[in-house]
Image: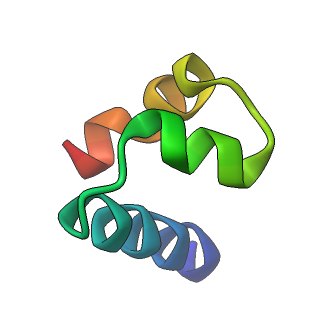
């Protein structure tokens, strides 16, 4: 659970820093749809 919380916190920080879902997805090597579907609710 702590690992998931850290991931969500990093996603929140990236989004606050102006990263698009596409930027996040590119960094993770997945599609933007995958990132948004997996983290969109937690991050907003």
| Number of on-image labels | 0
31 relative to 10 in the view: left or right: right
Q: Nearer the viewer, residue 43 or 20?
A: 20
20 relative to 27 in the view: left or right: left
Query: What residue sits 35% from the left and 54% below the top?
Result: 19
Residue 15's x, y, as percent?
28, 57
Q: Quadrant of residue 35?
A: top right
Q: Quadrant of residue 31?
A: top right
Query: What residue sits 42% from the left and 37% below the top?
Result: 21
The colour scheme applied to this rendered structure is rainbow
30 relative to 13 in the view: left or right: right
Residue 44's x, y, as percent?
19, 42
Q: Quadrant of residue 40?
A: top left
11 relative to 4 in the view: left or right: left
As drawn, the residue found furthest toward the top would be 33
Where 33 falls versus 15 (above or below)? above
Q: Split into 4 quadrants, where in the image is the N terminus?
A: bottom right
Q: Nearer the viewer, residue 37 or 32?
A: 32
Q: Nearer the viewer, residue 41 or 32?
A: 32
Residue 8's x, y, as percent?
43, 64
Where 14 falls versus 15 (above or below)? below
Query: What residue sits 55% from the left and 26% below the top?
Result: 32
Query: What residue sits 55% from the left and 82% below the top?
Result: 2
Residue 9's x, y, as percent?
37, 74
């Amino acid at each position: 659970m702590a690992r998931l919380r850290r991931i969500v916190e990093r996603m929140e920080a990236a989004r606050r820093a102006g990263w698009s879902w596409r930027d996040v997805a590119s960094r993770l090597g997945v599609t933007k749809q995958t990132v948004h579907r997996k983290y969109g609710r937690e991050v907003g």
